[in-house]
Amino acid sequence: MNSSPRVRFAPSPTGYFHVGGARTALYNWLIARKSGGKFILRIEDTDEARNGEEWVDGIISALSWLGIDWDEGPYRQSERSELYSKAVNRLIEERKAYWCDCKREEIDVRAKERGGPPGYDGHCRNLNKPKSPGSALRFAISRPGSTTVNDVVRGEVVFDHANLEDFIIVKSNGSPLFVLANVVDDINMKITHILRAEEHLPTTPKAILLFKALGVEELPVFAHVPVLVNAKRQKLSKRRDRVAVEDYRDLGYLAPAMVNYLALLGWSPGDDREFLTLDELIELFDLEKVNHSPAFFDEQKMQHFNGVYIRNLSDEEFVNYCYPFLEKCDWWTASDDQLYVFRAISPLVKERVSLLGEVPVMVEFLFTEDLRLPEDLVEQVLRKDAKAASILADIRSIYETIAQFSHDELNQATRNYCESIDTPLRKVQAPIRVALTGSKVGPPLFESIELLGRETTLNRLEKALQLINSR
């Protein structure tokens, strides 16, 4: 590998930032950081009809959140038209490109008449037509011949020119196609490694032909990383799969966890390790070890990764990460009392969530004055169990007399009660938890009751009894 590579990530701002794009950006970034090279961010925004400034902001925001910083850029192709015009003029002058005013209908009719493969037949190639309204500029491919892509991931891939048509490099509206703009930018920015998604492999022979036509003698290193697929082994699609990095950030994924998981989609360090720090990823990443097989984007596994990362946070880090999610709740006021209670419960919550977005749901019962019990839980847990009413009534009487109302004392008193009625603790805890928290799961029960306090606890037990008896 070049001792100081220059790599680029060149997304098109046409939608939310795809996890596949994030993986590609990460691999490029790891190459640059490992070797002391440069990571360049370039925005391919020449398609005015599909581009949106909000998508540019989303790309930059998502990359920043992931910790993928750039050494140069973000450059915008829309601001580099002069470079593309110079390249176009050179190709025309050297008769490596020509103007074509054939309509698609004409091309299709000729293909049908000749009985050959569909596509452009080079009709205008030797006519030396001037540029005219509606004409596009095509690159003249040498025939016969072939172009070989030497790909680090996929090996040697040969493309026969018989299967390539003279492709358009400037559209009829005068804007350059991305293959031309990319090659010109890669030359201008002295890009040494082009690492991108597998879907771009078919356009790579066109890029190589343009590189050579524009005088490049030493081609960049090419590497096309494997496609990401879902559980059905279908390519990830924004129409049916959750693919936006922004969505995962909003669900409560930690950026280091997502970076760690994305790095392993198509690459491994060569041993059984899965949990790797950023420094370890930089040290161990090797483009030669990237696999060409499709990589399964397993959301459940990534969530498991995230849970591990959450549990490895310090209590203070966890609290700080949770604040943005709490602030979205109408019951959160960040008062001193609320901050005290949340800090007290947070170490216990940290052990039970795999997403930060799960935290507000788990702790809401501590901050809601008027707790509403879900009707299904009232039926299943409180009314269906014939003993639930007597358990809640007995527990209310016991809790009313507890001196310190600490979790230890609450725990012991409840266990003593279970022994007295010869009932397992879990059977007694179930109706108590539903009555006090509105859920069947949550933080440890007795620590939660201590934070609720005696008055709230007794009131909620009484309301639960009223619900049971109101049938």
Image: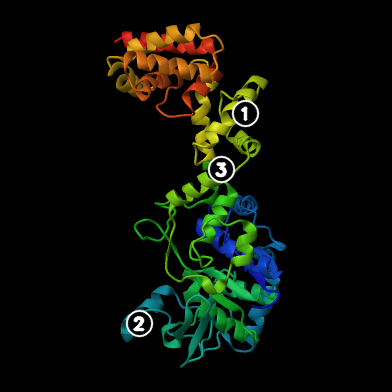
> Looking at the rendered structure, which numbered label has been put on residue 61?
none
Residue 132 percent coordinates (x, y)? 57, 77
Which of labels 2 and 1 is toward the front?
1
> Looking at the rendered structure, which numbered label has been put on residue 343?
1
Q: Judge whether 463 appears above or below 61 on screen.
A: above
In terms of image quadrants, where is residue 436? top left
Residue 72 percent coordinates (x, y)? 72, 64
> Looking at the rendered structure, which numbered label has been put on residue 310?
3
- Cα separation, mark 1 vs mark 3, equals 15 Å
- Cα separation, mark 2 vs mark 1, equals 69 Å
In the picture, measured across the screen, residue 392 lies left or right of residue 251, that is left
Q: Which residue type carries mark 1?
A: Arg
Q: How is the image coloured?
A: rainbow
Q: Report the residue marked by disc 2.
A: 117
Mark 2 and mark 1 lie on one chain; the one further toward the N terminus is 2
In terms of image quadrants, where is residue 378? top left
Q: Judge whether 443 appears above or below 5 on screen.
A: above
In terms of image quadrants, where is residue 283? bottom right
In the picture, measured across the screen, residue 452 lies left or right of residue 32, that is left
Mark 2 and mark 3 lie on one chain; the one further toward the N terminus is 2
Along the viewing direction, whichever of 449 and 18 lies nearer the viewer: 449
In the picture, measured across the screen, residue 459 lies left or right of residue 46, that is left
Residue 257 percent coordinates (x, y)? 55, 51
Q: Which residue type carries mark 3?
A: Ile
Circle 2 — which element? loop
User: Which residue does the image show at 51% across and 12% down from the upper left?
Assistant: 456
Which of labels 2 and 3 is toward the front?
3
Along the viewing direction, whichever of 470 and 87 lies nearer the viewer: 470
Q: Quadrant of the C terminus?
A: top left
In the picture, measured across the screen, residue 288 lies left or right of residue 111, that is right
Mark 1 and mark 3 lie on one chain; the one further toward the N terminus is 3
Along the viewing direction, whichever of 449 and 230 lies nearer the viewer: 449
